[in-house]
Image (cartoon, rainbow, N blue to C red):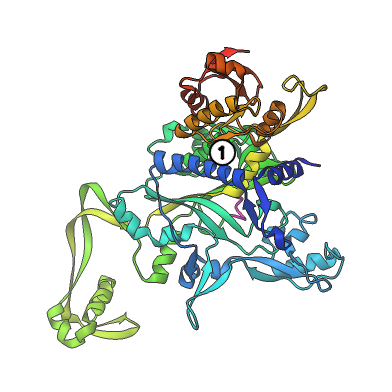
């Protein structure tokens, strides 16, 4: 049993993850989060919100998970969001064609359907399920289609990412932030991709949770106001050049920018912020790297793009976050589709005096001649050059029609004017997080097995294997377990009182009086509970209890008075366990 199987077995047994629709045989690409999994997921999301919403100031919005077709035509998803699919002629099973030949060529991702078919035929690649022949490859769009309203209602799609709602809301967001760049919006929510053959558990899902930030910046000013925070942070970078030799390099964020490895400060700051978040939630620093998209895989709209990749036991390096400079692609695409200008006016610190060619159509003369179309004709005239305007009869195209404008209806000249600012289309920096992949990786990196003495349980005669999830304390689903030594009323009552005090302090405390105390310790080790409180008969005499530390298994004796404050400090501050009470 490899580490993946160990983690998934524990996750199913202890209520972290369950296969969806299990009662009806299940279907690939869907997982339920049990009581502990759902809580763990919320802990990760809340830390994300603390960093991006509270600290960075990028307020959260919530958009529909169903979008109208026009949104996804503009974004390019209707025309280009697809994977190459081929089906077995014998059993009908569907596969991603590029995945079937990854053992043959490393360049499978970039091949055309025809090239994929050629390699499959030349290498006699067969169906992995039954060994049958494979049909021709074709593009399969990954969005779930739907219809909004009955009958001939509007076409819609389940969103494949949360980002588009934030682009569509740009003008509202700009107004909220009083047109001051940079500003950002965040969103955590479900996205949907109809994956062809998801066979990697929670690594590849058809319904998954994303956390995304869309940060709108001035394209002429990509320095970050808080760059000093991370400039000396060392990060494991697997740059385009490093991939040629197959070895990543650890360097500071400042060096990465100075050496031109990361395009600019704003993007580098976001890479460092992702690094900070992932390590804070429990990703091992030595199993984390940032891989730069190579020139031949870089999206056409991106200046630079980096993937945060986590090393897993079964799947190798797995992408969990993408950080990209998307330029003005998204806002320009939605502006073209909606016929609405998605821009922002930037005021200069000091107004500028500039020479400008000014066209002045005579509206008093044009009105009677062109009537209701006079305004669009005038706007078309303003786009002409001096040479075009010097002709006796000026021809313009406006509203799809050609108009002839007499020369005497237009004046033009070079004038010196004062300009207080300019209208720009902001660029977008986007960190996009796959929460489900991060959650699995946190569990795998926290998973540990060790042999320990049996001294914690009098019933045990030999050493035993201990399974423990070494979660970061702020991430652990259950913070404290309250355990009466025996199921006696005189011990149960004070135990429940302590549990209530902890809950009132905001700590998720579990009460457990079932089975031997050693077994209860092991159960809480398995779910990653940082601390256990044991109430025994000495408690009734001196009002003290035992607190046990999950990782070291050390114990201290602590007064009941203000125990909730002690536990809160152990969980949420840097207080050392040894300082909490008298060692046992």
What residue is shown at x 49% (from left), y 66% (from top)? 66
Quadrant containing the N terminus is: top right
> Could you tell whether 9 is left or right of 151 in the image?
right
Secondary structure under tag 1 reads: helix
* Horizontal arrangement in the rendering, residue 354 relative to residue 539 (left or right): left
Residue 369 x, y percent position in the rendering: 18, 87
Near-viewer residue (238 or 578): 578
Given the current orientation, which residue lies at the most extreme bottom position? 369
Residue at horizontal 24%, vertical 76%? Answer: 389
> Residue 388, percent across and down?
28, 76
Position above or below: 581 against 128: above
**Residue that appears at 25% across and 50% down:** 347
Magenta stretch containing residue 550, yes or no?
Answer: no
Q: Position of residue 234 (x, y in %)?
A: 55, 31
The total of numbered circles placed on residues is 1
- Depth check: give the residue in front, 300 or 394: 300
Q: Residue at x 51, y 72 (%)?
A: 156
Q: Is residue 287 left or right of residue 455?
A: left
On the image, numbered disc 1 is attached to which residue?
278
494 vs 316, nearest the viewer: 494
Kindly indicate the quadrant of the structure image that contains residue 169.
Answer: bottom left
Residue 316 appears in view: yes
Does residue 296 belong to the magenta stretch? yes
- What's the magenta region? 293-298
């Amino acid at each position: 049993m490899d580490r993946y199987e160990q983690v998934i077995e524990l996750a199913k047994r202890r209520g972290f993850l369950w296969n969806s629709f299990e009662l009806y045989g299940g279907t690939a690409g869907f997982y339920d989060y049990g009581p502990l999994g759902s809580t763990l997921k919320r802990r990760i999301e809340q830390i994300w919100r603390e960093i991006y919403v509270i600290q960075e100031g990028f307020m959260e919005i919530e958009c529909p998970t169903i979008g109208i077709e026009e949104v996804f035509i503009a974004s390019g998803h209707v025309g280009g969001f697809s994977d190459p699919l081929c089906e077995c002629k014998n059993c009908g099973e569907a596969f991603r064609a590029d995945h079937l030949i990854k053992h043959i060529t490393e360049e499978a991702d970039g091949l055309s359907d025809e090239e994929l078919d050629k390699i499959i035929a030349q290498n006699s690649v067969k169906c992995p399920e039954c060994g049958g022949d494979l049909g021709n490859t074709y593009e399969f769009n990954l969005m779930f289609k739907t219809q909004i309203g009955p009958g001939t209602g509007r076409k819609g799609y389940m969103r494949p990412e949360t980002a588009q709602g934030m682009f569509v809301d740009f003008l509202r967001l700009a107004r909220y932030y009083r047109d001051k760049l940079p500003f950002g919006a965040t969103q955590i929510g479900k996205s949907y991709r109809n994956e062809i053959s998801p066979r990697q558990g929670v690594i590849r899902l058809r319904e998954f949770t994303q956390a995304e930030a869309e940060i709108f910046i001035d394209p002429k000013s990509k320095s970050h106001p808080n760059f000093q925070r991370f400039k000396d942070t060392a990060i494991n970078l697997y740059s385009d050049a490093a991939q040629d030799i197959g070895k990543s390099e650890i360097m500071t964020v400042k060096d990465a920018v100075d050496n031109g490895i990361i395009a600019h400060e704003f993007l580098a700051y976001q890479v460092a912020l992702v690094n900070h978040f992932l390590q804070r939630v429990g990703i091992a620093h030595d199993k984390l790297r940032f891989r730069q998209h190579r020139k031949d895989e870089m999206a056409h709209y991106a200046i630079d793009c980096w993937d945060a990749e986590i090393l897993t036991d079964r799947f190798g390096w797995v992408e969990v976050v993408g950080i990209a400079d998307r330029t003005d692609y998204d806002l320009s695409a939605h502006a073209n589709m909606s016929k609405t200008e998605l821009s922002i006016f930037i005021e200069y610190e000091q107004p500028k005096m500039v020479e400008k060619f000014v066209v002045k159509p005579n509206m008093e003369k044009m009105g009677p001649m062109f009537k209701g179309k006079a305004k669009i004709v005038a706007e078309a005239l303003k786009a002409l050059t001096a040479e075009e305007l010097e002709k006796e009869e000026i021809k313009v195209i406006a509203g799809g029609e050609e108009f002839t404008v007499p020369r005497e209806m237009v004046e033009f000249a070079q004038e010196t004017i004062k300009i207080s600012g300019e209208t720009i289309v902001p660029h977008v920096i986007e960190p996009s997080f796959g929460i489900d992949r991060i959650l699995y990786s946190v569990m795998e990196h926290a998973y540990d097995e060790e042999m320990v003495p049996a001294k914690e349980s009098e019933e045990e005669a030999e050493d035993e294997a201990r399974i423990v999830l070494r979660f970061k304390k702020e991430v652990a689903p259950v913070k404290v377990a309250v355990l009466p030594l025996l199921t006696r009323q005189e011990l149960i009552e004070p135990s429940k009182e302590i549990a209530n005090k902890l809950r009132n302090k905001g700590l998720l405390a579990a009460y457990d009086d079932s089975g031997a105390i050693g077994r209860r310790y092991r159960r809480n080790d398995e779910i990653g509970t940082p601390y256990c409180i044991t109430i025994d008969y000495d408690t009734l005499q001196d009002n003290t209890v035992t607190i046990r530390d999950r990782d070291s298994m050390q114990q201290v004796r602590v007064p009941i008075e203000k125990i909730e404050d002690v536990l809160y400090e152990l969980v949420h501050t840097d207080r050392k366990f040894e300082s909490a009470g008298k060692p046992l």
